[in-house]
Image: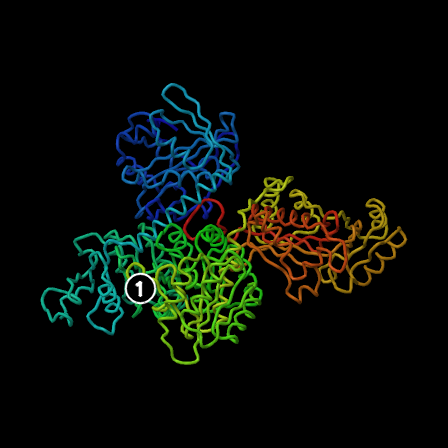
């Protein structure tokens, strides 16, 4: 892969490397991907095709002499036709080349070529070239990541590269990508080798790169230096007028450009001017192309039918981000869905990001930006809370409620149809944003649930996330609750509860423990707070009733005494006087009494809600600062907010747990076998038979109690002798296995005679042609494990007691995959009936470590082999020493979308 040959071209067909015998005539479509460069811009990757030949020649001609020298180890002003043909005609197995495209033009090329002909069949040589204009955007590591993904899929385990010793940037790319390099020197060249298996260190580097690029792309949205409003109008009844007016009223710190079409010379109703086109007193332009200066953000408020025309102008102008408030896309039916798909594709093709369509808009209260590009008539003052939602109508209500409660916002994003920018992107930004300390989410769906869980776990370690999940079916709600809890997300049911929790988290410290004191002037309300708090997990250790006639000084002294002591971790202050009093004096007394305390304080003050001015500590820009005391309409709501904060603090105090791979797992063997089975069924999903399932589970150290399939009395008798008595004879059909009356099985059969009798009975009863004879397992508590791909949450695993009774009681507990070691242990203890495992009513405790080990093995199986769509182990008999799997079933199928595995891409 050094200097190309200048030999005459010949006809080149896609062929494999010498001796490999492998070839693909079409590349896997999943290799094409939209990715984010380090500056937040979008780049499209896809495998090279022969039709790219002319573009490759043009790409090479625009490289600088030094870039060509570094790539080809010598002056190469022109690529010979044979080399062009070789580069663009690959077999997608032993030779793969990827092109990075922007606006349809090649800006980078990466290639690997197998070294089987050199006696190293597991290795491939890798190289890539980035155009000079796009160097420094992180395209090298991106190409390397995606080439490694393709190579691993094709069976390679190692990359090698020849690099000029002076090309230190290339070696740095390999190292900074997270690979462990082996280097050797040969004169002026450096030979580099590294394994491409995705290690934990490598995944950490990839995730950090993803986080930085996605955060940067959202920063381009929320921190623009200039804004164009397309569809701006002087007509107050139009959306374009509202958007422009809100941006002006919000005092955006950069230039604002109204765009209102060819008829821009309309009379400006605000200024009364005619002639020079203007809207609301600002010079207007017919199109974005006509604006003389750069435009970072375009807010689009034109009918859906002409968004395509506007988009062409934005692409030509080099706009970084679009916010489309226009409706009439995916929410309007099949035609709208297709229009939205084309819109997203065109936006990404030209390196942009998109918020919407049908979005309310975005806002950033940072004084250095002061952007209110929303349709909301009112937004809150600056603060420490970030908010994300989809629905525009809901967003208006949310912003109004936050303003009324004096809950300051740092930034706000309403994503509408969420066609491109999602909650995951915005979470990445808030994770890096010092101005945001609390995150609020209104989730209509999870998008990519696996990625959400991964990001939320990290963000929640430093910043609380409070989420409302729209109601769904019973199973979905239970799974959502447990998956969010696993990630440290505080889940609430209503918008009011969302703001209740946010008011505390934004202004008060977290409670160090559950011990709570109630101080107030109403014994009834104090008792109510204590009762509700206890039901929510708080330990109300102290209740002080100062009486309805207490003075401000007496109220202050009572609160101060509790705050200074060590008997409690949090305080609920209740002040609802029976007669009119000077409330400000009591508010000042409460603030003074808690000013030096590190305990969180919440209040029911005069029955008002929010961060009242009388209970506020002035912050920057006049917004309430930390130390301000939130007030709630009722003491039970104050207690509920405090309970959320305590449970979140308890989650955050848990040690970060690794995900330790159990010994005795063989991913390669299972992956190969699963893909062979799918190939035999044209890639369709199939339910494996018990023997296939048992064999695959055994490769992960999951041993199903031995059984033999039999179809006659003689086979049954022989099988029982082979397995050893006692045995069980079981039906093989689904409708008979697992019945609560156990009519589909005969257990504890001590001899051949009883086996023969059981076989005859079950054959006649069930009509099954094949029965199972299985060795009896040690007695134990019947449990079950089920790992499966949920349409809303991705890969999840369930654990619970086995049997129809527990199924009816909906007592299974759920966690998202991958599991950590701690997740597995907690999952075993999570069902309400888990007491059966720990010595209920004098029974011997079972081996819960063995159950946790099984959970980890199933977790790694589904993680390693995404084609495994479902694994059910039911029943598992948990005994005092070990756990025995009696029955198992596995379903395999094509890899589901949005797995958040492999090379990073937009939409994952």
- Graded by Cα atoms within 10 Å as few (under 14), some (14 to 19) or many (20 or more), the crowding at tag 1 reads some
Locate residue 376 relative to residue 47 in the image: left or right.
Answer: left
Locate residue 136 relative to residue 475 in the image: left or right.
Answer: left
What coloring was used for the rendering?
A: rainbow
Residue 338 screen position, x and y as percent: 38, 61
Of all residues shown, which one is farthest toward the left? 275
Where is the N terminus found, in terms of image quarters? top left
Q: Quadrant of residue 175?
A: top left
Depth check: give the residue in front, 248 or 197.
Answer: 248
Residue 287 against residue 197 in the figure, above or below? below
Residue 335 screen position, x and y as percent: 38, 65
Q: Quadrant of residue 534?
A: bottom right
Residue 698 screen position, x and y as percent: 68, 44
Locate residue 611 relative to residue 253 in the image: left or right.
Answer: right
The answer to whether residue 411 of the structure is visible from this angle is: no
Q: Quadrant of residue 237?
A: bottom left
Residue 797 against residue 537 in the figure, above or below? above
Q: Which residue is mark 1?
A: 381
Of all residues shown, which one is farthest toward the top? 187
Residue 96 against residue 271 in the figure, above or below? above
The answer to whether residue 250 of the structure is visible from this angle is: yes
Residue 565 screen position, x and y as percent: 50, 58
Q: Residue at point 46% right, 71% down?
A: 574
- Marks counted in the figure total 1
Q: Residue at point 44% right, 25% down?
A: 183
């Amino acid at each position: 892969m050094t200097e190309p040959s200048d030999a005459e071209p010949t006809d080149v067909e896609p062929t494999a490397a010498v001796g490999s015998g492998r070839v693909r005539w079409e590349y896997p479509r999943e290799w094409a991907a939209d990715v984010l460069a380090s500056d937040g811009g979008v780049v499209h990757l896809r495998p090279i095709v022969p039709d790219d030949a002319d573009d490759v020649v043009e790409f090479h001609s625009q490289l600088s002499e030094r870039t060509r020298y570094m790539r080809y180890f010598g002056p190469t002003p022109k690529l010979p036709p044979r080399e062009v043909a070789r580069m663009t005609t690959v077999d997608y197995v032993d030779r793969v080349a990827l092109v990075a495209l922007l606006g349809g033009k090649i800006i980078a090329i990466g290639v690997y070529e197998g070294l089987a002909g050199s006696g190293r069949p597991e290795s491939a040589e890798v190289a890539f070239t980035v155009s000079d204009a796009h160097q420094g955007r992180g395209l090298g590591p991106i190409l390397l990541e995606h080439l490694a993904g393709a190579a691993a899929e094709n069976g390679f385990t190692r990359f090698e590269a020849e690099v000029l010793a002076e090309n230190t940037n290339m070696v740095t790319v390999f190292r900074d990508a997270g690979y462990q390099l082996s280097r050797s020197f040969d004169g002026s060249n450096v030979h580099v080798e590294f394994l491409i298996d995705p290690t934990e260190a490598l995944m950490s580097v990839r995730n950090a790169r993803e986080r930085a690029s996605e955060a940067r792309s959202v920063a381009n949205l929320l921190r623009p230096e200039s804004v164009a409003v397309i569809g701006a109008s002087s007509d107050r009844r139009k959306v374009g007028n509202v958007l422009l007016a809100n941006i002006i009223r919000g005092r955006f710190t950069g230039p604002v450009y109204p765009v209102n079409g060819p008829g821009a010379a309309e009379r400006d109703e605000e200024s009364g001017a005619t002639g020079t086109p203007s809207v609301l007193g600002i010079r207007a332009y017919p199109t974005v192309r006509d604006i003389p200066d750069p435009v970072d953000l375009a807010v689009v408020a034109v009918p859906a039918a002409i968004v395509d025309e506007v988009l062409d102008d934005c692409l030509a102008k080099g706009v970084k981000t679009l916010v489309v408030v226009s409706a009439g896309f995916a929410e309007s039916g099949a035609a709208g869905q297709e229009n939205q798909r084309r819109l997203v594709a065109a936006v990404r093709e030209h390196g942009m990001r998109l918020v919407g369509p049908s979005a309310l808009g975005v806002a950033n209260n940072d004084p250095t930006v002061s952007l209110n590009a929303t349709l909301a008539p009112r937004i809150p003052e600056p603060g420490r809370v970030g908010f994300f939602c989809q629905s525009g109508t809901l967003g208006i209500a949310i912003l109004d409620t936050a303003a009324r409660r004096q809950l300051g916002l740092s930034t706000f994003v309403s994503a509408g149809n969420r066609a491109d920018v999602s909650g995951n992107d915005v979470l990445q930004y808030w994770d890096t944003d010092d101005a945001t300390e609390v995150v609020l989410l209104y989730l209509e769906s999870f998008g990519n649930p696996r990625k959400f869980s991964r990001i939320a776990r990290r963000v929640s370690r430093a910043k609380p996330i409070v989420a409302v999940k729209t109601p769904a079916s019973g199973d979905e709600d239970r799974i959502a609750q447990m998956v969010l809890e696993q990630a440290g997300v505080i889940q609430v049911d209503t918008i009011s509860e969302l703001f209740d929790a946010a008011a505390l988290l934004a202004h008060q410290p977290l409670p160090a423990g559950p011990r709570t004191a109630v101080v107030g002037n109403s014994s009834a309300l104090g008792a109510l707070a204590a009762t509700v708090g206890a039901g929510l997990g708080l330990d109300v250790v102290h209740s002080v009733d100062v009486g309805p006639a207490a003075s401000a000084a007496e109220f202050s002294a009572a609160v101060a005494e509790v705050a200074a002591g060590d008997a409690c971790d949090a305080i609920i202050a209740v002040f609802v006087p029976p007669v009119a009093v000077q409330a400000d004096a009591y508010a000042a007394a409460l603030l003074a009494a808690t000013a030096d305390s590190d305990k969180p304080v919440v209040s029911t003050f005069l029955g008002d809600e929010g961060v009242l001015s009388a209970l506020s500590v002035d912050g920057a820009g006049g917004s309430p600062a930390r130390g301000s005391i939130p007030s709630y309409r009722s003491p039970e709501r104050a207690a509920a907010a405090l309970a959320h904060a305590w449970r979140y603090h308890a989650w955050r105090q848990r040690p970060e747990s690794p995900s330790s791979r159990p010994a005795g797992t063989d991913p390669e063997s299972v992956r190969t076998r699963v893909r062979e089975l799918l190939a035999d069924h044209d890639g369709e999903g199939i339910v494996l038979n018990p023997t296939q399932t048992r064999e695959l589970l055994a490769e992960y150290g999951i041993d199903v109690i031995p059984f033999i399939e039999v179809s006659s009395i003689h086979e049954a008798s022989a099988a029982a002798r082979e397995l050893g008595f006692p045995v069980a004879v079981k039906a093989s059909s689904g409708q008979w296995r697992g019945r609560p009356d156990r009519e589909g099985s005969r257990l504890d059969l001590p001899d051949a005679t009883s086996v023969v009798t059981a076989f005859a009975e079950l054959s006649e009863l069930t009509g099954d042609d094949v029965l199972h004879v299985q060795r009896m397992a040690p007695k134990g508590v019947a449990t079950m494990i089920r790992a499966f791909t949920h349409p809303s949450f991705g890969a999840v695993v369930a654990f619970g007691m086995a049997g129809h009774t527990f199924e009816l009681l909906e007592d299974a507990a759920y966690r998202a995959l991958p599991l950590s070691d701690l997740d597995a242990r907690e999952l075993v203890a999570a069902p309400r009936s888990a007491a059966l495992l720990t010595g209920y009513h004098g029974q011997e405790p079972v081996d819960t470590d063995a159950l946790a080990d099984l959970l980890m093995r199933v977790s790694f199986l589904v993680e390693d082999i995404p084609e495994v769509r479902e694994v059910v182990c039911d029943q598992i008999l948990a005994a005092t020493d070990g756990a025995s799997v009696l029955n198992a079933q596995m379903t395999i199928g094509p890899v589901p979308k949005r797995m958040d595995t492999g090379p990073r891409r937009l939409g994952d």
